[in-house]
């Protein structure tokens, strides 16, 4: 059977971690379909530049003609769909890009997939999977107690989470209406190497090193459930390979922290690993700023289903994962400087061949 898999959004933070993992741990050929928005960075895949099993295609998931051509050319055994606009703050300032990519793009990809899948021979048709990578934010906000289950009703707060909830509904509708064999995973906050410095952890690391304020929204008492990105990538591999079609799996790290605790932990790590030249602590740079509108108070995942049914557990706890993350940012000036200067946008044209 053909061993080609489509990955959308493979130049992003989680997608690139998944591409690196699957190239290392499988013999699959990956067709990486990515529009390269500001969040797409092929420098995160620089180590795969000469890897023939990584095929990059600069394609917008809203472009049906281009998607149809890719399906006909590569005849994949499945799709893992990560391409999205992913940042809540950006969705508050400009929601329409989120509607376009996350809703219209997912619907377009579903239609292109269905059109290819329905004509496959029986064995390939049965084995095919469309795996949608989604978020715990679709469930809305928790109070002080409780955990998100796969059965928790949807109650999204931001344009981002509403667009992801909508895309989840579309994926389920394509399963119920057309029998497309789908999988959905809803994951908590990821962190780790190669994360774009708009999300909390890289913002804090890079601002700290640059001597800038460390912005904490509101009182800093919002809680997130942090998962090391390589643990997420392993979970995605497992669900794609062994998950039951039609099922949803929640993925989380059992690492609930307030934002204040995250910022404090980062400052303490940086004090140890790259002390400030004036001898003061990075904690001095903490700054409370206006809260995010509609800011969800608490997210926490019950990951017992994926643990029980597929045997997945995270390898990193927050202490080990955060130290690895800080060490990675301290050791990768080149990647960081190219992101800060915007040079990463030109990097592909100079270094990467579209196959
Ligand atoms: P990211 O913003 O780092 O990467 C998104 C990628 O999608 C980029 O490479 C971008 O170029 C590409 N893309 C955007 N619009 C596109 C389009 N129209 N066509 C093709 N490609 C397009 O995002 P991420 O943090 O890696 O998240 C990946 C997925 O995982 C998203 O679907 C997100 O909703 C979901 N998710 C993220 C987290 C998290 O903590 N980051 C947690 C749970 C789920
Ligand atoms: O829960 C999964 C979601 O996690 C994903 O679906 C999203 O794609 C991903 O961006 C992330 O969303 P959050 O909004 O939780 O992540 P962010 O890093 O933007 O913010 C984390 C928390 O930190 C949140 O409570 C807001 C706060 N924050 C964020 C930034 C950028 C700050 O206090 N200061 C900041 O500068």
Image: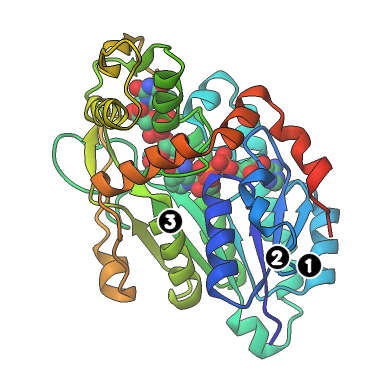
Residue 280 versus residue 311 in the image, above or below: above
Please name which of the two marks, 3 or 2, marks the residue nearer to the observer: 3
Residue bearing mark 2: 113
Q: In the rendered image of this protein, does residue 263 appear above or below residue 121?
A: above
Percent x, y of residue 258: 22, 30
| Residue 295 in sight from this viewpoint | no
Q: Secondary structure at mark 2?
A: helix
Say whether residue 145 is left or right of residue 103.
left
Where's the C terminus, which quadrant?
A: bottom right
Q: Residue at x 56, y 18 (%)?
A: 93
State the SS at label 3: helix
Decide which of tag 1 and tag 3 comes sooner along the chain. Answer: 1
Answer left or right for 286 relative to 192: left
Q: Which residue is mark 1?
A: 71
Q: CA distance from mark 1 to mark 3?
A: 28 Å
| Mark 2 nearby-residue class (10 Å; few <14, some 14–19, many ≥20) | many
């Amino acid at each position: 059977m053909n061993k080609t898999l489509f990955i959308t959004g493979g130049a992003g933070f989680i997608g690139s971690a998944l591409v690196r993992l699957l190239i290392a741990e499988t013999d699959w050929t990956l067709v990486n379909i990515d529009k390269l928005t500001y969040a797409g960075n092929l420098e995160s895949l620089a180590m795969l530049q000469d890897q023939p099993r990584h095929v990059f295609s600069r394609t917008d998931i809203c472009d049906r003609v281009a998607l149809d051509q890719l399906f006909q050319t590569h005849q994949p055994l499945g799709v893992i769909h990560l391409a999205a606009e992913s940042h809540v703050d950006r969705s508050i300032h400009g929601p329409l890009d989120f509607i376009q990519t996350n809703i219209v793009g997912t619907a377009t990809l579903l239609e292109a997939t269905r059109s290819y899948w329905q004509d496959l021979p029986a064995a390939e048709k049965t084995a095919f999977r469309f795996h949608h990578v989604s978020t715990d934010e679709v469930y809305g906000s928790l109070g002080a107690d409780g955990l998100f289950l796969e059965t928790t009703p949807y109650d999204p707060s931001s344009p981002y989470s509403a667009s992801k909830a909508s895309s989840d509904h579309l994926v389920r509708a394509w399963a119920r209406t057309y029998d497309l064999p789908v999988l959905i995973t809803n994951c908590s906050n990821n962190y780790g190497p190669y994360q774009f410095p708009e999300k909390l952890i890289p913002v804090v690391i890079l601002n700290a090193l640059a001597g800038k304020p460390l912005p904490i929204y509101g009182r800093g008492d919002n809680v997130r459930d942090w998962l090391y990105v390589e643990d997420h990538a392993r979970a995605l591999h497992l669900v794609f390979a062994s998950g039951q079609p039609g099922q949803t799996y929640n993925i989380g790290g059992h690492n609930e922290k307030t934002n204040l605790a995250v910022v404090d932990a980062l400052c303490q790590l940086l004090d140890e690993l790259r002390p400030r030249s004036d001898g003061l602590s990075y904690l001095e740079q903490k700054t409370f700023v206006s809260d995010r509108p509609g800011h969800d108070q608490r997210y926490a995942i019950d990951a017992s289903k994926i643990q029980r049914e597929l045997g997945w557990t995270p390898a990193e706890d927050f202490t080990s994962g955060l130290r690895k993350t800080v060490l990675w940012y301290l050791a990768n000036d080149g990647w960081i400087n190219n992101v800060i200067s915007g040079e990463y946008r030109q990097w592909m044209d100079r270094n990467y061949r579209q196959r």
